[in-house]
Amino acid sequence: MRILIVEDEPGISNFLKQGLEEEAFAVDVADNGKEGLELALSGNYDLLLLDWMLPGISGIELTRQFRKDFPQTPIIFLTAKDTVDETVFGLQSGANDYIKKPFHFEELLVRIRVQLRGKTDSEEKLSLGPISIFPDRHLVLNGEEEIQLTQKEFALLEYLVRNKNKVCRRTRIIESVWDIHFEYNTGVIDVFINSLRKKLNLHIDEDYIQTIRGVGYMAKDL
Ligand code: CA
């Protein structure tokens, strides 16, 4: 899952980037509306976190332009504005939710997860064969046994399992799991896949994560 933050206060964007990366999101940051819009229109993001008042293009205008091409991608506003009129205006412009500054990171995280999982209240559980993944708690189980994964291993596994039974191309995996500053070398995926396979302790004939030679990987229930 990859998130774009557009925020001109570095204190806030650095804090958010660090917090979200600890939750296994890949995070890019733009500090002005124009760069934010350009990045957003690349289509590489699962969710946008937008400040309202930005240099150049405002969060509202960015949302209007982005929505022409991406009607579905969730947008959450970070805003110091909190009168009812302004909130309504923000939501009417195409945002899905908003959070008032100052906010608690935990609350923002819950709002992000709600947007990403389609607004259900129950905890999300993903599964692959004997493997269960609980994204909200960062928990991975093989049967009953808890598996300790790094943030990137977790993000990679989550991406593959969300796209189960589909071939995941290397470039798409990179775009979802690593941020824009990642030096473009898709070979690193193989290293992480090997490590994942070891940690998940799957038997050699249980090919739940299949290599699609020359293309990428596919998670598959057997
Ligand atoms: Ca601002």
Image (cartoon, rainbow, N blue to C red):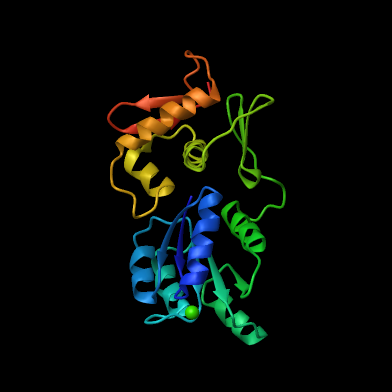
Given residues 139 and 171, the one toward you in this image is: 139
Q: Residue furthest right?
A: 122
Residue lying at 67% horizontally and 84% vertically, measured from the top left: 84
Relative horizontal placement of residue 121, taking residue 177 as reference (left or right)? right
Residue lying at 61% horizontally and 42% vertically, measured from the top left: 138
180 versus 189 height, above or below: below
Given residues 220 and 179, the one toward you in this image is: 179
Q: Position of residue 19 (x, y in %)?
A: 55, 57
Q: Residue furthest top?
A: 205
Q: Position of residue 168 (x, y in %)?
A: 39, 37
Given residues 93 and 15, the one toward you in this image is: 15
Residue 74, can we see it? no
Residue 109, can we see it? yes
Image-quadrant location for residue 218: top left
Q: How many marks?
A: 0
182 versus 48 height, above or below: above
Residue lying at 43% horizontally and 46% vertically, measured from the top left: 177
Image-quadrant location for residue 193: top left
Image-quadrant location for residue 54: bottom left
Q: Position of residue 127 (x, y in %)?
A: 60, 32
Residue lying at 63% horizontally and 74% vertically, measured from the top left: 102
15 versus 81 height, above or below: above
Q: Position of residue 212 (x, y in %)?
A: 34, 27
Q: Residue furthest front?
A: 11
